[in-house]
Amino acid sequence: MAFLSGSKKFLLNLLVHRCIGCGSRMEAGKGRFCSWCLVRMYPDGERMIEGIRVLTGFLHSGVMREMILRFKFGGERHLGRELARLALDSWKEIPSGDDTLFPVPISRNRLRERGYNQAALLAVAISRETGASFRESLVRSGGESQIGVSGSERVENISGKFSVSPGTGCTGRAWLIDDVMTTGATITEIVSTLSDAGIQQVQPAVVCFRKIREKSIIPSKEVNHAGI
Ligand SMILES: [Zn+2]
């Protein structure tokens, strides 16, 4: 009987509709987010970084920040699809079937630690939704993670750290996809790398924009867990 009641609970749990943001129970047919999470979502739009227009879906705050941290540091890969959908709903433009998506690469150390590149998961999900092609042609050579690094140090750290696989090209626009943009140093560096490789029409797009803090008040050991 104990087994049966356990199975019943399991089946009932499968039928329960939960908010993607906070996990609270919701009535079926009421959308993917509860009203509490909806008011903690802050759409952004676009940011100009050194003359480059970057599409920014949301501010890195509230429920979007929480979901990004779960996605990036909590191993919840499945959130890539949800975050991609939210970004596509929020961006002023979306990729077409002729375009190519290039995820921002992460360092080899980070990839080993995390087991996946969150930007690549986002790009795959965006590719499925829009029909745009997906290419992991960008390579990050030895650059350390930018987490917890100040604005001026970031520019110095990443200069010349990216390369493009030989023979990479694209017919439509090249979309540079990432989860979070802070200073935009990574994005401007990659746009320049792609331009050197003959790819001129580049549209960077990120799920969230995070405001710059020159110096994080969080100790560096805790930075990864806090995602700041
Ligand atoms: Zn919620």
Image: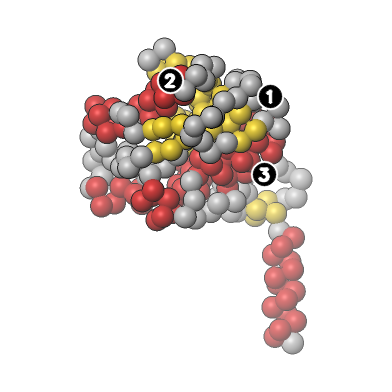
Q: Residues within 10 Å of mark 3 (few under 14, many from 20)?
A: some
Q: Disc 2 or disc 3, which is closer to the eye?
A: 2
Place of residue 112 in the rendered image (x, y in percent of width and height, measured from the top left): 41, 55
| Numbered tag placed on residue 32 in the rendering | 3
Q: What residue type is disc 1 on?
A: Asp
- Identify the residue shown where x is 44% and y is 16%: 52
Marks 2 and 3 close (CB-CB < 8 Å): no
Tell me the distance, in whole angstroms, between the alpha carbons under discs 2 and 3: 42 Å
Q: Is residue 75 above or below residue 21?
A: below
Question: In the rendered image, which quarter contains the C terminus?
Answer: top left
- Identify the residue shown where x is 23% and y is 41%: 217
- Identify the residue shown where x is 47% and y is 23%: 197
- Identify the residue shown where x is 75% and y is 74%: 8
Q: Which residue is mark 1?
A: 98
Q: What residue type is disc 3 on?
A: Arg
Q: Which residue is mark 2?
A: 196
Q: Residues within 10 Å of mark 1 (few under 14, many from 20)?
A: some
Q: Disc 2 or disc 1, which is closer to the eye?
A: 2
